[in-house]
Image: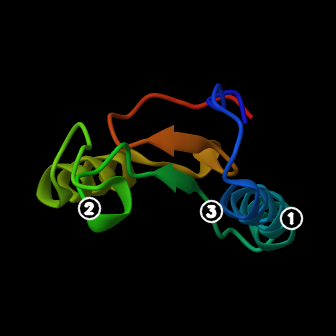
Amino acid sequence: MSLNTTGQNYGYRSSKAALNSLTKSLSVDLGARGICCLLLHPGYVQTAMTDHRGDMDVHESIAGLAAVLAKATFDDNATFFHTNGSVIPW
């Protein structure tokens, strides 16, 4: 939510907020069983949804997300990561 500086897109934004809440709840329930849940932001990707105006192509985004996953530990449970590895505040 801290990245929302433009408003609009209410349905899209509310669905993302619901996903965040779901992931947080899963991190509590599944964390007790040793399962780590992460949220991953792919970045502003050049796709049809962004009219191909993103900061990176799909391959760069996926490579970044794979690197985040490769470094993740259980201590990262319920953390929201950007594809560049930075933590996004709730």
Cα distance between the residues tagged 3 and 1 = 12 Å
The kind of secondary structure element at disc 2 is loop
Pinpoint residue 46: horizontal percent, then vertical percent. 22, 53
Q: Which colour assignment does the render follow?
A: rainbow
The kind of secondary structure element at disc 1 is helix
* Residue drawn where x is 38% and y is 34% of the image: 85
Q: Say which amino acid is labelled 3.
A: Cys
The residue under label 2 is 47
* Residue drawn where x is 24% and y is 44% of the image: 53
Q: Quadrant of the C terminus?
A: top right
Q: Is residue 24 left or right of residue 68?
A: right
Q: Quadrant of residue 87?
A: top right
Q: Say which amino acid is labelled 1.
A: Ser
Of discs 3 and 1, which sits in the foreground?
Answer: 1
Q: Say which amino acid is labelled 2.
A: Thr
The dot on residue 79 is none
The residue under label 1 is 25
Q: Residues within 10 Å of mark 2 (few under 14, many from 20)?
A: few
